[in-house]
Amino acid sequence: MLGASRWIICFTVWLYAYPLLASDPIDAPRQDLAGEQFMLANALWTLLHETAHAMIDELDIPIIASEEDVADQLATLALLGRNPNFDLPGGVTQVDSVIAAATAWRVEWELEKWEGTETAYWDSHSLSIQRFYHMMCLLYGNNPEKYDAVQEQLGLPYEHALGCVDEEYERAHRAVKWIIDTYGRQRGNATSQGAVSVVYEKPLTTEHKEIAATIKRAGIAELVAKRTESTLALPEDITIVFTPCLSGATAFWHSERKEIVMCYELLARFRYLYQAKQCLEMAGDEEIEACLARTQN
């Protein structure tokens, strides 16, 4: 496990410090993404992921791949689309959010190994480590000259890295353009089109109260709601709901209620993953184990 720990250290250093082209500083990742920013970035990506599920369902968008993989791609591409509306407080850019969300999946994978969790190969989602690599592949494909360090740092074979540009990113980019062209909101259309509202249900714990306040201040849900309304022609109104969940740390699209549900427990999980990431950056196995134990208590 020590080798994996060293890999995490090297990778984390690269995540927040790899060189970028000076001609485009707006996309430069932050050097010191803090815990709350990490949580917000992951909340934004997850909300976009669940919004993608809602759009596929509501607009009856045809897909031939795994819907979970498609939703991952749509969420990632939304943040790589250079839309300044998705920048977060504190100078956290869209690229920061993609990297933070990808990092969370990498940390989840490392934690599964540490905890000896049985891998759910039957699950509808790709493995956590696959989701990480797919997201970083899209990042590289978005601008291979700027993010040329991705290929080397992730150990991507040259042939696969080319595929990130010519196949993964370009194909996904064309698909997104087709969706907007086909299902986009038409200007001047008198037909009633659905709206997106946001509801914050009462948190039940002190931690969840803090999280709810942070999410409200950042206005993440309102950003996504406004962007969705202005981009796509929704057949019905939908609601983004932040709520306590008995089902645990999750988020999902509830088709019957027309709700995108974001559980406070999941946002708390993002906080934990940030702390766990710091633990995994330690050099020794015993130190990592003790740190993780303290984090869970």
Image (cartoon, helix red, strand yellow):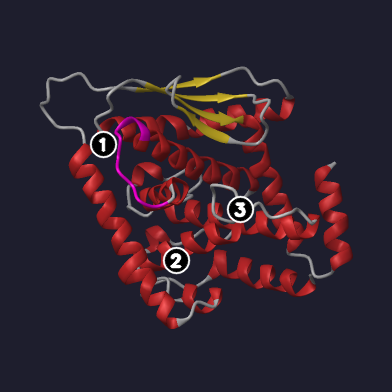
Part of the protein shown in magenta:
57-65
In the image, farthest residue toward the front = 122
* Label 1 Cα neighbours within 10 Å, binned few <14 / some 14-19 / many ≥20: some
Q: Secondary structure at mark 1?
A: helix
Quarter of the figure that contains the C terminus: top right
The one nearer the camera, 34 or 135, is 135
The reply, left or right, for residue 105 in relation to residue 3 is left
The reply, left or right, for residue 31 in relation to residue 245 is left
Mark 2 vs 3, N-terminal side: 3
Q: Residue at x 35, y 51 (%)?
A: 64
Task: Give coordinates of residue 169: x percent, y percent.
Answer: 34, 63
Task: Give coordinates of residue 20: x percent, y percent.
Answer: 43, 71
The one nearer the camera, 292 or 127, is 127
Looking at the rendered structure, the kind of residue marked 2 is Cys
Q: Secondary structure at mark 2?
A: helix
| Residue 139 against residue 182 in the figure, above or below | below
Looking at the rendered structure, the kind of residue marked 3 is Ala
The one nearer the camera, 253 or 266, is 253
Residue linked to disc 1: 231
Residue linked to disc 2: 137
Mark 1 vs 3, N-terminal side: 3
Tell me, yes or no, if residue 127 can be seen here. yes
Task: Give coordinates of residue 1: x percent, y percent.
Answer: 79, 70
The reply, left or right, for residue 274 in relation to residue 67 is right
In the image, farthest residue toward the bottom = 158
**Which of the numbered marks, if any, corresponds to residue 104?**
3
Q: Residue at x 21, y 37 (%)?
A: 184
